[in-house]
Amino acid sequence: MADPFTLSAGGRNPSFEAAGRGRRLSGFNPPRNHVNRAIQAAGDTILSRARWLYENDGICGNAVDEWAATAVAEGVKLRPRVKGHKAKVSALLDLFWRWAEEADADGVSDFYGMQERIAREVFLAGECFVRIRHARPGEMATVPFQLQILPAEMLDLSYEGPPENPDHYIRMGIEFDARGRRVAYHFWRWNPNDYQPPHISALYERVRVPADQVIHVYESRQGGQIRGVPRVARVLVKTFGLEVYDDAELDRKKTAALFTAFLTGRGEPPFHSGNDDDDEEIAPTFEPGAIVDLGEDRDVKFSTPAEVGGSYEPFQYRNILKICAGLGMPYAIVSGDVTRGNFSNVRTAIIQFRRRVRQWQYNVLAYQLNRVVWRTFVDLAVISEAITLPGFDKPDSGWLYCDSLMPRMEMIDPLKDVQAEKEELRAGLKSRTMALAERGYDREDVDDEIAVEREEAKTRGIKFDIEHAKGETPTEPDEEAIAERIRDEGGYREAA
């Protein structure tokens, strides 16, 4: 007798309704391919369609740009995770800021501008490659290396080798060793979808680049995933369908706007080419306000174009909502429509969106990009003798580790948000270091600036509201003392 608890997988009476093959699920038979096989088979097509939507569809293009603006803004700042050595930390940061100006091998932007381009590319294409290019002596004024952004098309999804080392294997352009560790990337020398430079004999030549010279930034959603998937893949069909529908509605509205009067009768319609020898009939041209003669014994009839109806806007709204849900972004940010909803639910959506952005900032951008760039920078800075760092050779020195200071998120309700933050500080629920880091600042830098400003204000005899809050009596600046100090410094002050 068969075990009554043993049922065939996907049978007519399964233990899980989701595994059934009845009427409702008879056509629901998705493939069981691993994500790598799916990317290898369809990645090129999805990527080309995603790029087309970005350039031609307003909803998709705005979503990508808004994501990059929120995730990076003016740039994610890096700071070494070192205690003490304040002077050396300041010198290292000053060197990094000067290197950031010449970090881009293409000379398009600085390092923070590259972060923005990388964030946009990862959202749109699912991945982005950054090649570390070592500079020759004398090419750079700071640390001798630069970064070059390579799009996903530069790594062929169909390339499988064979590798030079028989113990290695190549999958989708990436070379792995026997333990599954990445050892090299096989890039096209030139973009296969672009014009090739003149006098090039090998148009489709590959270049093997060691893995320690490549930064691969992508979102890994499944275990073992080695290439990225465009974020718009899950809404690509609906976005394109909505674009086609919107164009059709626009054409219908244009046609309906052609208000025309027709002169009708029982005679022959006077449609002809204008040549007496030519009996070929031609159709009239419909224009707004035109009167079309349709024959003798005339009667006047006016066109009654069909209205689009009241379903257009609700249909658009619901479909854009689904697109926003697939992209993980609020409707108001993607569409720019802030009329639907009140302050509370819009604020809730923005908070949820920012939580998702923070997750991506720390788990993808900070770990995959900033961490590797900082390690490379510090290593080459010490090797090239651009700076000396005490205790650098010790494994626990901390010079090779960095914190990423994310750009501040604008307050939704500044007065209430600041008051709430003050209460958290008073209650010990957070430190000033945490509060300033959330705004994209470093606490030590802020303290140094405040100390310098207060000392200078004291010298000038200026008092601010922050001093009044401590119980001090507000006083006017000593104009005579300020004027005397300015004269001593060789300056001049005109009377108001």
Image: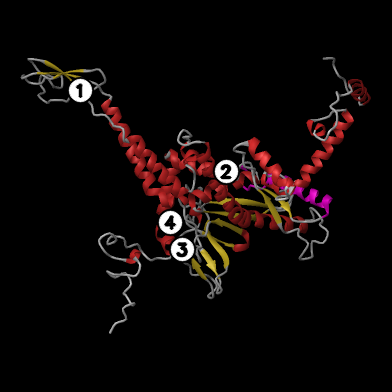
Question: Which residue occupies the foreground of this view, 404 or 148?
Answer: 404
Q: Are marks 1 and 4 in contact (CB under 8 Å)?
A: no
Q: As shown in the figure, which amino acid type bears the numbered disc 4?
A: Gly
Q: Determine the secondary structure under disc 3.
A: loop
For the residues marked 1 and 4, what is the alpha-carbon distance in whole angstroms?
Answer: 50 Å
Q: Residues within 10 Å of mark 1 (few under 14, many from 20)?
A: few
Label 2 secondary element: helix
Distance from label 1 to label 3 (Cα)?
A: 61 Å
- The residue where tag 1 is placed is 303
- Which label's residue is closer to the chain start, 1 or 4? 4
Quadrant (top left, top right, bottom left, bottom right) of the C terminus: top right
Q: Earlier in the sequence, mark 1 or mark 3?
A: 3
Q: Please name the amino acid that badge 3 sits on.
A: Tyr
The Cα–Cα distance between marks 2 and 3, rounded to whole angstroms, is 35 Å
Question: Which secondary structure lies at badge 1?
Answer: loop
Instruction: Say if residue 52 shows up in the picture.
Output: no
